[in-house]
Image: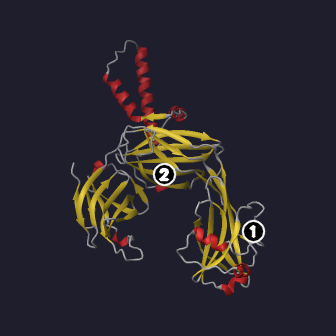
Amino acid sequence: MKLTPDDLRIRQALEQIETPMYDIAGAVREQRARRSRRMPLRSPQRILAAVLAAVLLTATAAAAVVQFSGGWNALFGKNVMIPDGLATPVRQTQTIDGCTITLEDAIVSEDDVAVLYSFRYADNSIVNSGTRMTILGNSNLLMDGSDEYCLSSSGMGSMDSQDPSVEYYYEAFALSEDPGDRQLTLTIDPASYMEQTDSLPAPMDLATIYRSHPVSYSEEADGAQRLTALQQQDCTSVILPQSYQSPEIQFAGVAFQGDILCVSLCMPEYDSYDSEAAQIDALRDIRTGHLYYGSLHSYGDTNSATELCETQFEGLSEEDLPYLEPQISYRRCTPLTETGWSFSFCAPSAKTLTRELNLTMADGIRLNQLTITPLGIELTGTMAVDPASDNPLYFDDQQTPVVTLVLQDGTTVHTVSHGNSLSSDSADPTTAQFGIEYQYQTGSESRRFLQTETITAIRINHATISIEE
């Protein structure tokens, strides 16, 4: 439907209205109640008023359709598919200290709630640049004011490729009770921004530091043990590249873990809201200019007040130490807002399907339960494990069952596994319980969401399960 200029002005006016709680279900019930009462019209003015009200209602409904957030495309691809009526437009906006978050849409089902929200600066400046990144705090979903119903959450964020002044976030929360028509509150902790420096050279004599007290520890050594061992080395002569800006970040020492060279920094525990940290990105061989890159590991001490940031390098020995120069980068998190955001809304819940299963796959995996929600599918079951193995709780991707849906119109929907969990059975160490989550796919790149009423069957590998009414 193409909107006229007047329609657009109406829509813009509606978008400016902010309410602390958007009760969709209540509004629907109220509208139905009003329609059930006959109101006699006794004058042309009342007839005109009724016509204008109908036009406004139609324009509002049309606006609700065209206002469907573009964040779905930014996050899940331009071919993302969402059935009409599944997502609820919330459209609540709050600006705190020049930072604006809009809770745009929500999908509510009997088992979970998904929300899509966006972040902008009030001056529409770029959210992230090459050296600066905006970081939102943790989010949580409360039901009836309590967080006891939220079992788990997962999420993602993405920049809009067409508009660098906005970033979209998607969060999905699993709940222990049906959230339909109950007060839901999304809270988001205060925001900060992180600035990252380039890698800076840190001239130091690693050989002399190591020889002042050679340190060797096992792979099982925890943070407190590593810190205690390194504190015996003499690092007093080391001056880091930005010691004047970050005096609390210090060089911790050099050690070997078997044939792995470990070079470490010591700093206060990292806080993504207000802190500073550093890491050793590489070691430069001053003879050849070659850069050696390692793997980064973080260890906390006993009271979690100090963090050991250790970079491990393979293929280097004590003989190489005189010629290695650490390259260090810094990152600093600075608060953007003093407080966080809070949005409240409610909506009816879409149907969730749960089926008990008794299926054994070819590799011995046993499926016990199937849960189908508008967001995706979860399979739970048990599998045999070897408690004597180095990694008994390991789920091979090749063991993941292939899941396909059949819809009422005869079309099929493919799924992709996006996560699994595995836990041991205390009563039987040779058996583990698992859960596998799947998302619905559109093509090979985009995601889709489904009304469960449109599903007639589900195929798990070669077994077909009919979905009864």
Q: Which residue is at the front of the view, 125 or 161? A: 125
Q: Which mark is residue 170?
A: 2
Image spot of residue 340 (x, y percent): 58, 44
Mark 2 and 1 residues: CB-CB less than 8 Å, in contact? no
Amino acid marked by disc 1:
Leu
Task: Determine the CA span between mark 2 and mark 1.
Answer: 39 Å
Amino acid marked by disc 2:
Tyr
Q: Quadrant of the N terminus?
A: top left
User: Residue at 41% across / 74% down in the picture?
Assistant: 391
Left or right of residue 329: residue 364? left
Left or right of residue 395: residue 240? right
How packed is label 2: few (under 14 Cα within 10 Å), some, or many (20 or more)? many
Residue 278 at least partly seen: no
How packed is label 1: few (under 14 Cα within 10 Å), some, or many (20 or more)? many
User: Residue at 26% across / 72% down in the picture?
Assistant: 362
Considering only vertical position in the picture, is 264 above or below 108? below
Q: Which residue is at the front of the view, 324 or 96? A: 324
Image spot of residue 256 (x, y percent): 61, 80
Element under disc 2: strand
Image spot of residue 90 (x, y percent): 47, 40
Q: Quadrant of residue 306?
A: bottom right
Q: Which residue is at the front of the view, 209 or 398? A: 209
Image spot of residue 338 (x, y percent): 64, 44
Element under disc 1: loop
Residue that numbered label 1 is attached to: 240
